[in-house]
Amino acid sequence: LDKRSAGLIVMLNNNDEYWKGANEELKTLEQAEPVDVTTLQFFSYFHQCADDLRKYIEMINENTRPVQGVSLTPYAMRAFVRVFQLIDKYPNSSKPLRVSVTNQSYYEWLQDLERLDQHRISLFLVQHLNEVDLNSDVFFVEIHPNNVVATKQFAHDVIGLVGQLPERRSTLVIDITLNALNDSEVKGIISKALGLIESGHLNLILIQSLTKFSQLRLDKRSAGLIVMLNNNDEYWKGANEELKTLEQAEPVDVTTLQFFSYFHQCADDLRKYIEMINENTRHVYHSVMTQLDEMEVLSRKPFRLTLSSDPGACYIALNISGLIGIVNENFTLQENWMEQFLKDLLKHFIHPLCRLLKLPLTERMSIGFPLSSVNVVFDSLRITIGLESKADLDHYTDVLAYVAFVLNRIRIDRLELYTDATYRKEYFEEKVNLFSALHHLHFTPYEVIYYINTNQYRDRERARHFVERKVWIQNGTVNICHIAEIPTQFFTDKTYDESHILVRVWGTEQALCDLTYPQKRMVLSCLTGIRSPKETTTNDVYLNVEEIKIKQANLDSQHVKISATAEQIKFESFQIVDNWDKIQIYGPFPPDNINFRLNNMTISALIGDNELNLPIYVKQGSMCFPLLEMPIEDREFLFAEGPYKNNRTPIGNHMMVKKVNEEKIVIERDYICVSKPGFTVFQRFITDTTTYFEIDYWSIKDPLLARFMRLMTAVYIHKKDTNIGFGARDKRLSHFLMNIDLDRGKPFMTEATEVVYHKRDCLHKLLLHVEASMVENTYSFLQRLSNLRNCSGKSLVTYIGNPGLITAAYELLKPPSVPASLPAALPPGTGSPS
């Protein structure tokens, strides 16, 4: 701490006549030159910490011999900036400086890097450490990313990166905000890097935001930490001295130093605290996934948990990227719509549910709190899980699973939920009341009148009688009053209790009374008594009333509904039906000749007839995720869309399946087609003349812009060669099926993505100024190629409702040598196509 100065003498002898005079003189000298009382008290305190002192010295000797500086900055982002202030002191740094940075770094920091003078640095943005340019001068990485808008989240193998670094001068900056300084991951990195550090090839800088975990989330002080490790030779000496100079020029106040010095003594408690946060986060994440699978929430496009394989994640992300494609089909919505929708979702749905269960959910704009918190970030909700009891964590699971179920089962044609604030509020309040009626802590009485189609009943009295059907819940027990069609008479009123209300779950028909309360809530949430704003009434008779049906997952245009007889009422199957409702065998796949058996949405891996009891992972490029954490629709897409013979035997080696160290099975299906700083394209072989391309502009944080860029990439290819048609897997416009082989597709895709990415700012301005007059008719993707379909026979998205916008965007993208095939339609204020 460097707060007091003193020396210590300990003298040991047998105090015989020879030594007695020296012993007495020691006491005399101490009395003649006394040490003040506060200094005695100060060191007496540390004498009680003797064991900690021994460990401290051992750690210094073992791990931190090359430490050249430990510095605090006034706030965390300043620590990142200070790294660049040091670089001028490196005598032979290349100009411009080659900087590699992962896309999941601080969003503000990425923006700062992009604004720096191009003559100062060359920026290489990467999604995965396998894509890093090892000849870079500076690397900015993190062990556990904290970028909530990323659609795929995973930990980075920093130790693996260190092992690949060449013996050349470089600086590796690691953000360890989501780690404790004394945890095994940090120690492992230092140990791996020690050889490069001592040889002078590596300057290792650890950066940590002390505002997050380092104060056990008291959130009382703001600061950043820099630890710099190198061998202090002539090359690094200037930077080491500059670090001290900068610290003196921008000092941190004494109370902040004392505050964090205190918490540094709690390093072991801090490590345990982070471990508990991570454990609770994974518990809630897996529990929500399990509930959604149990209720067969197959299509999670509108509202989905962001796929995460990071065991050190401290939050759960819920994103509405799929909803954007549904609501913003013609690209006319602005970014503030997303924020307002998510705020209403919190205000009228999530927070009321949490209040019902007495859950202390806050809205704090950070991570690592001891109580769970939620906040809006672009198209996502970041939910940080705290140290609540298991009972409270299970309640959070119920809330998140219920919210996800309700939003994913909304009828696509009921867009008022997303565009009309009043309707949205009423709809969410209805679902909260239903939740309360079917939760054992409340069992509040509940009654709702739901409406069904009246078009076939021209008689007003019959229509009035037919549309008003009731669901009522008393003491947690459900009753439904419905019209039954009986052979002996036209219609009759019938009340059904839970034993006569049937639901088909995972291929088995079950009575409502046999389901859990979470399952009952989800089943009943498929009915609503809230009329949309476009529904009108005349003489108390509802006209133009839409039929309220349960959304079926595999196609947006299909729905399942309620059917009734005199004996029972049925909620038709939630299943994805078709191929997953019966046993299918796929394989054997090279190189290990593994088969997959799909049966009622369960997946088993086999060699011959022997089932392999190993976890199954899916590898895409450099990323690897557990298969069972993917939405069921994506699992089906993995198998159903492929090059198979009639017996499901794969054609060629386009899907590789292998065992890894007898620990797991890895499926590799989508391979990298194009990988550049800012974007990646994956390719999937379908036939010799058709290919699936997944386009991921992962560096674009604005989901509206990223979706538009993906569309314009495909349009650009079609304009280059009008014989190339394409269709999108769904309205997210992320996967495109094209009638082009892999060899021809790669150069087309490379050129298109580079052009679109280069023009991203122009496309963004165009989106901001899109005019309603541009939205007319539809723009067809397929043109003459209407026979292009998925292997599974499902329809592709083949048109968009804004041809004027697409035409204007292509005018910005087209090569100068290509004459315009359509007139430019730039809106005012966006400038010329150049």
Image (cartoon, grey):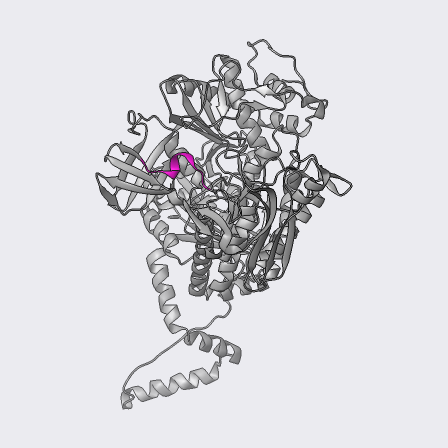
**Does the magenta run of residues contain 729?**
no
Observer-nearest of 696 and 565:
565
Instruction: Tell me which segment is drawn in magenta.
Output: 575-584
Q: Nearer the viewer, residue 143 or 435?
A: 435
Viewer-side residue, 550 vs 459: 459
Q: Residue at 38% across / 73% down in the picture? A: 50
Q: Is residue 351 visible?
A: no
Asked whether the viewer can see residue 100, the reply is: yes
Task: Please say if 687 is above or below 389.
Answer: above
- Left or right of residue 757: residue 741: left
The percent coordinates of residue 235 (x first, y second) are 41, 42
x 32%, y 31%: residue: 655
For this orientation, the residue located farthest to the front is: 488
Does residue 515 sit above or below 81 in this rendering? below
Q: Which residue is found at the position 51% from the left and 68% from the top?
A: 3
Q: Relative to residue 742, is residue 175 depicted above or below?
A: below
Q: Is residue 601 left or right of residue 773?
A: left
State left or right for residue 593 relative to residue 678: left
- List x then y, in percent, for residue 206: 45, 50
**Quadrant of the rendered structure where residue 332 is?**
top right
Q: How many marks?
A: 0
Q: Is residue 580 magenta?
A: yes
Identify the image quadrant of the C terminus. top right
Q: Nearer the viewer, residue 157 or 683?
A: 683
Pinpoint residue 194: horizontal percent, then vertical percent. 33, 49
